[in-house]
Image: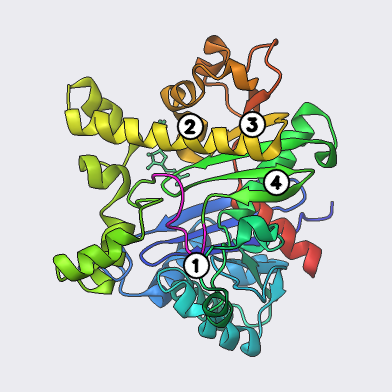
Amino acid sequence: MVAERVVLVINSGSSTLKYQLVEPDSGISRAAGVIDQIGEQSSVADHDAALRMAFARLTEAGLDPSSVAPAAVGHRVVHGGNDFYRPTLVDDALLAKLRELSPLAPLHNPPAILGIEVARTLLPDIPHVAVFDTAFFHDLPATAATYAIDRRLAQTWHIRRYGFHGISHQYVSQQAAAFVGRPVEDLNQIVLHLGNGASASAVLGGRPIETSMGLTPMEGLVMGTRSGDVDPGVISYLWRAAKMSVDDIESMLNHCSGVFGLSGERDFRRLHDLIESGDVAAQLAYDVFIHRLRKYIGAYVAVLQRTDVLSFTAGIGENDVAVRRDALTGLSALGIELDERRNADPHPGVRRISADSSPTTVLVVPTNEELAIARDCVQLI
Ligand code: AMP
């Protein structure tokens, strides 16, 4: 029997490191884990310590990364800028370019670079591949990618709408097409990735034509702790009137806004408990989240003109029956009819939750970014 090849996928965030050993062909996950609170008090000191801890856990599970000899190590990199939109073999030159891109994604790219550096020292003889979360949206039509600001300034500073969660939007749109049994090229789709970060995309024939995140992952939908769309005037107003620094404003919009900023709770399971108990702030946070989501759905139906499939994915999209119901209630005029019973069925895996009469097929599609990254890696090498 030939042993299945495996890929080690690493996703380094600012304070978390997720790892997974996955078989790209079968899709089977051999081992997965998260190390969190990196750099926080009385916890894992840094990314070096975190990755060594991940390796120790894999070894304990009988999957020592050096003896398992993965075909590749795949690294999720949030921002690829304009230059990186294909899975790319990591070398010193790539790392240098990624460092240059860090000002575009100061919260996300530096930890990914650290993760790559440490992983390369631990597994020096295995190809390392960077897979970019912006890649899927690289060819967004100019009408969707362009901010209506001074064009010379935008050009000088590479300001455009890049889009994020691309690994997930691409994977989910392909899974959805496979489920309905039609080529992705024939389908107009809306994908709603609703997790701690949240984004929507409109995908025409397999290629995205709109997405809700922009230069950074802050634009668009209301998220766990991120504001999504705000009037840019809020920033200059806080700077002038509240004398907040740019860093403080950015941190507030990223970490103390969204559902958390409005209610003090970012996890939707507990948000529902608070609403049950009569918490008015939690109710408003939920309502603002749903309102923004419905605005985007309406906009994307208009952009696509015909919507064949609408898919929910990620932690909230896959699990939260109420969010799916409240997002789509009353949209039969747009061709979207939910089946309440199917929506409430917790069956795992890809499933249809629209009524048979619904012109738009509504699906729940579990995302699997690690598998998508692993498949990108083996395709490259
Ligand atoms: P993700 O970023 O995709 O891992 O999603 C994480 C978020 O999904 C959590 O913060 C929760 O808000 C939400 N979530 C996870 N499980 C559930 C569930 N069973 N019901 C509602 N929301 C959930």
Q: Earlier in the sequence, mark 3 or mark 1?
A: 1
Of callouts 4 and 2, the N-terminal one: 4
Identify the secondary structure beneath mark 2.
Answer: helix
Mark 1 neighbour class, 10 Å CA radius: few under 14, some 14 to 19, many 20 or more: some
Residue 18's spot in the image, x, y percent? 48, 59
Which amino acid is tagged 4? Gly
The residue indicated by pointer 1 is: 55
The image shows residue 358, relative to residue 164, as above or below, that is: above
Whole-percent x, y for residue 225 in the image: 32, 50
Query: Badge 2, how many Cα within 10 Å: few under 14, some, many 20+?
Result: some
Q: Which residue is mark 2?
A: 294
Percent from the top left, x then y, of residue 160? 57, 67
> Residues in magenta?
214-222
267 or 34, nearer to the observer: 267
Question: Magenta includes 52?
Answer: no
Residue 366: x, y in percent?
59, 37
Disc 2 and disc 3: Cα gap in Å? 13 Å
State how far apart marks 4 and 2 are (Cα): 33 Å
Q: Nearer the viewer, residue 327 or 270?
A: 327
Farthest residue toward the left?
Answer: 242
Q: CA distance from mark 3 to mark 4?
A: 24 Å
The answer to the question of whether label 4 and label 1 lie on touching residues, with beta carbons closer than 8 A, is: no
**Residue bearing the label numbered 4:** 27
Front disc: 4 or 1: 4
Which numbered disc, 4 or 2, marks the residue closer to the eye?
Answer: 2
